[in-house]
């Protein structure tokens, strides 16, 4: 159950994602927490140069720079942290962060997928 205190397993409640909105973000969620498909697609249309459905580390850095609002240190740092953690967790063996992996963050299924993948590797 969702409470006021931080849970030790750091659950992410998608219905409350708008509360974590900050400056210098991608705009994939609007101010009411609604997913904006056009903004999601824009990430890849504008920044995925080597492969239309994935981002390299350099392309991710390009996106973060493009999203940066001047003098928005907190928002820029938040965006950088979120995306770099995602890249670290979600990149494939070729260093590509795939569109479906990014989509899984926004629909809330990424961590379930990571757990399934880890279980498969262990068995």
Image (spheres, rainbow, N blue to C red):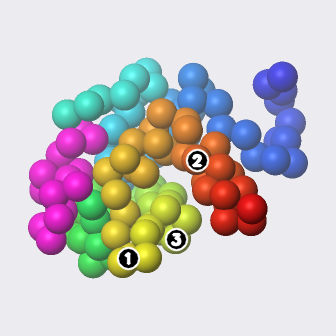
Mark 3 sits on what residue? 88
Q: Is 24 on the left-hand or right-hand side of 3?
A: left
- Residue 113's disc number: 2
| Category of crowding for the residue at label 2, using alpha-carbon neighbours closer than 10 angstroms: few (below 14), some (14–19), many (at least 20) | few
Element type where label 2 sits in the image: helix
Residue drawn at the location 21% of the way across and 42% of the way down: 41
| Category of crowding for the residue at label 3, using alpha-carbon neighbours closer than 10 angstroms: few (below 14), some (14–19), many (at least 20) | few
Residue 76 at what x, y percent from top left? 41, 62
Front residue (pair 41, 16): 41
Residue drawn at the location 75% of the way across and 62% of the way down: 123
> Which mark is in front, 2 or 3?
2
Residue 119 at what x, y percent from top left? 72, 56
Residue 10 magenta-drawn? no
Instruction: Give the quarter of the figure containing the N terminus.
Output: top right
Q: Is residue 61 above or below residue 41?
A: below
Mark 1 sits on what residue? 95
Q: Is 8 on the left-hand or right-hand side of 28?
A: right
Q: Is residue 90 above or below residue 10?
A: below
Magenta residues span 39-53
Front residue (pair 73, 80): 80
């Amino acid at each position: 159950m969702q409470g006021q205190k931080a849970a030790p397993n750091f659950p992410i409640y998608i219905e409350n994602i708008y509360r974590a909105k900050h400056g210098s973000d991608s705009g994939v969620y609007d101010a009411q927490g609604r997913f904006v498909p056009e903004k999601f697609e824009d990430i890849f249309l504008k920044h995925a140069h080597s492969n239309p459905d994935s981002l390299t580390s350099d392309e991710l850095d390009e996106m973060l720079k493009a999203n940066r609002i001047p003098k928005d240190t907190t928002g820029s740092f938040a965006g950088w942290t979120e995306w770099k953690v995602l890249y670290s967790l979600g990149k494939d063996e070729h260093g590509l962060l795939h569109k479906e992996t990014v989509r899984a963050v926004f629909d809330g299924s990424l961590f379930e997928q990571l757990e399934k993948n880890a279980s498969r590797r262990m068995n």
